[in-house]
Amino acid sequence: MTDDLHYRVLKHLQAHPDATQRDLAKALGISLGSTNFCVRAVIDQGWVKVQNFRRSDNKLAYAYLLTPQGIEAKARITARFLQRKRDEYEALKAEIAQLTAEAESQCQRDDRT
């Protein structure tokens, strides 16, 4: 499981501990099977614990709660995620500046002819 997916799973479960795996799959845009794999992975790593409870309609449901280790892991993953996004932003900014310069140069050449 990638850092991005770990981040998104932990973020969603922290915000919506009573979400079903179907809800989580829809929010993440991945299959229900992949979601089950992801949830099991964060549980196996000790980052999330599962608590059973009964909803008002008497269906068995679960609450996914981040453990202290899960909160620490989410903080580390968030820092790496943020740095990766900053790096991507800087690379895009440089590419936009280069393309802008090329376009301006091309326009100046076209004006001369």
Image (cartoon, rainbow, N blue to C red):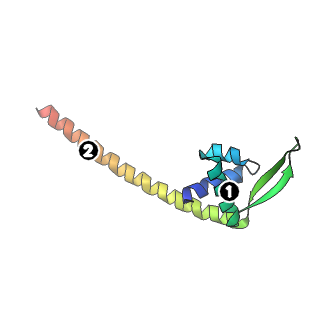
Residue kind at label 1, given as amino acid type: Val
* Residue depicted at 43% across the width and 54% down the height: 88
Q: Is residue 47 visible?
A: no
Q: CA distance from mark 1 to mark 2?
A: 47 Å
* Residue depicted at 64% across the width and 43% down the height: 26
Query: In this rendering, is residue 104 above or below 37?
Result: above
Mark 2, secondary structure of its residue: helix
In front of the other: label 1 or label 2? 1
| Occupied quadrant, residue 10 | bottom right
Q: Answer with mark 1 or mark 2, whichever residue precedes in sequence.
A: 1
Mark 2 sits on what residue? 101
Which quarter of the rendering shows the N terminus? bottom right
Mark 1, secondary structure of its residue: helix
Q: Residue furthest front?
A: 33
Mark 1 sits on what residue? 39
Query: Measured from the top left, where is residue 57 in percent x and y?
Result: 87, 40
**In this rendering, position of residue 68 left or right of residue 61:** left
Residue kind at label 2, given as amino acid type: Ala
